[in-house]
Amino acid sequence: MKSRREFLKEAVTGAVLAGSAAAADKLALAGVVVQHAATGKSRVVIARDASLHGAGAQLDEQRVLNLLDKAMAAYTGLDKPVEAWKSVIPAKILAGGVIGLKVNGLGGRGISTHAALTLAVAERLQQAGVRAGNILVWERDARSLNACGMTVNTDPSHVRCYGNDVGGYEDEQVSWGSARIRLAKILTRECAMVINLPILKDHEMAGVTFSMKNMYGVVDRPYELHGNNCNPAVADVNCIPAVREKVWFTIGDAITSVYDGGPGFRPERLWYPNALVVGEDRVALDQTAWQMIERKRAEAGMPTLEAVGRAPKYIATAADATHRLGTNDPQRIRLVEV
Amino acid sequence: MRRFGPARWNVAIVALTIAAVTASVGCKKKAVDPFPASGAVAGWEKTGDTRVFDAKDLWRYIDGDAEQYLKAGVVSTSTSDYKYQGTLEALVDVYTMGDSAGARKILETGQTSDAKNVQVGDAGIAYEQSVIFRKGPYLVRIVAYEATPDTQQALIALAHGVEAKL
């Protein structure tokens, strides 16, 4: 039997999505998804602010918060930030569930999810009613968190922040397709839902890393999942029920990016899109991210990712009839640029 | 009293031989410390501990980037943070490859038309915020987190400091 959330999501993407009814019921929400269902398309918002970086390339934190509000308003149709957040986060979770903020610090300093964005999301969540200790900023390890400008904190009276090196991994392996992995306990045991905060990057193996690829940070041995341009492994990992059901909202950091030579910090290929990319359909988000990278590469006179043998084929795989994680069809993506 | 017979002598000789060979190999493989100490290069301070990753653990450091280094025969990677004149932060990565061909492969693969050739090591290139060079089996990448008018020259100076220790 389909849950309410599955039913609504199906209306959004036109795809039939799998998932456990119990978990989906927990995530059931109405407002924003119903609005999108009316269009029959997956909504992806790109919000930009060309002045995000102030003098000396320093990020203006207030402008980041304002940009987040702008993105959320465009996504939900609600101008008041707190109301926008309440329309996205299920009431049960607002009241007492732990919300993970899965950042990405793999590329090291300079090309990791910006602390200004992470803290802006944490601030708005608290204003929407989430207790500080129920917000858990999370990555693979302390080093990756430090790269994101965060420091480890396990004190539940504040926003918590620690990695899988503290939380550990499940003993039991789970599998879906090619992926045979052990999941981070932060995902399986701590979080009621996860807000995905990836950073947009070119990727030596995957082609592009953004929403779905960020889930490599929730598994114990990500290096085993890089074969064949990470295809179908990225899609397979996202099909694992805990990932599919708990990680369904993305606020993508496209403030800074690398359009070639990623996923590490390559200052010679650094680029400032000054944008946030927001949505629920992880496939539509990655399809949009891919096009952003391709446009920048073309502008820089570089060959396409297809031409250099790194097209992110996992995106189409994620949309196929086996995975059904969302849509990569531009005709079924409603791109809103503000 | 127990007799220390020929069999035991043989065991002792074998053990001593193994110990001698191990010590010899150990000496040959003694790790190079490529990181200049604070003040060894004018204006530069070493601000972090040196971290070392064997090839099998390189994914812990650069994950998706690791594959190209593994294909080129990386043996180990060491890294440390630096700061120039108390403000400009930088990162030095030293990749020890199996041979010079591996280092050359990485340098040439990453090279783009806007790279400026610099005289460091066997071959080197510089961008506004980074310097990459190779020397024998070593591939060194130095990146700065900020672009200032002095960044490139400061990085090249640090690169020479690293080169001198390889």
Image: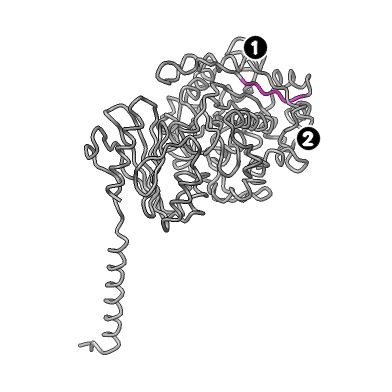
Element on which disc 2 rests = loop
Q: What label does residue A16 carry, if any?
A: 2
Dot 2: within a 10 Å radius of its alpha carbon, few (fewer than 14), some, or many (20 or more) residues? some
Element on which disc 1 rests = loop
Q: Is residue B67 above or below residue A335?
A: below
Dot 1: within a 10 Å radius of its alpha carbon, few (fewer than 14), some, or many (20 or more) residues? some
Q: Which residues are magenta?
A: A41-46
Q: Position of residue B113 (x, y in %)?
A: 50, 37
Residue drawn at point x = 59 percent, y = 14 percent = A70
- Magenta-colored segment: predominant secondary structure: strand
Amino acid at dot 1? Leu
Left or right: residue A64 compared with residue A27: left
Q: Position of residue A32 (x, y in %)?
A: 69, 19
Q: Position of residue B6 (x, y in %)?
A: 27, 89
Q: Position of residue A57 (x, y in %)?
A: 43, 21
Q: Is residue B146 above or below residue A38?
A: below
User: Total label count?
Assistant: 2
Looking at the picture, tell me which residue is in the foreground, A303 or A155: A303
Looking at the picture, tell me which residue is in the foreground, A248 or A70: A70
**Residue B132 within the magenta-colored segment of the rendering:** no
In what quadrant of the picture does the N terminus of chain B appear? bottom left
| Residue A128 seen in this snapshot | no
Disc 1 to disc 2, C-alpha distance: 28 Å
| Residue B66 seen in this snapshot | yes
Residue drawn at point x = 34 percent, y = 47 percent = B121
Q: What label does residue A78 carry, if any?
A: 1
Residue sticking out furthest to the left: B1
Amino acid at dot 2? Val
Looking at the picture, tell me which residue is in the foreground, A336 or A22: A336
Residue drawn at point x = 32 percent, y = 45 percent = B50
Of mark 1 and mark 2, the one earlier in the sequence is 2
Left or right: residue B83 compared with residue A228: left
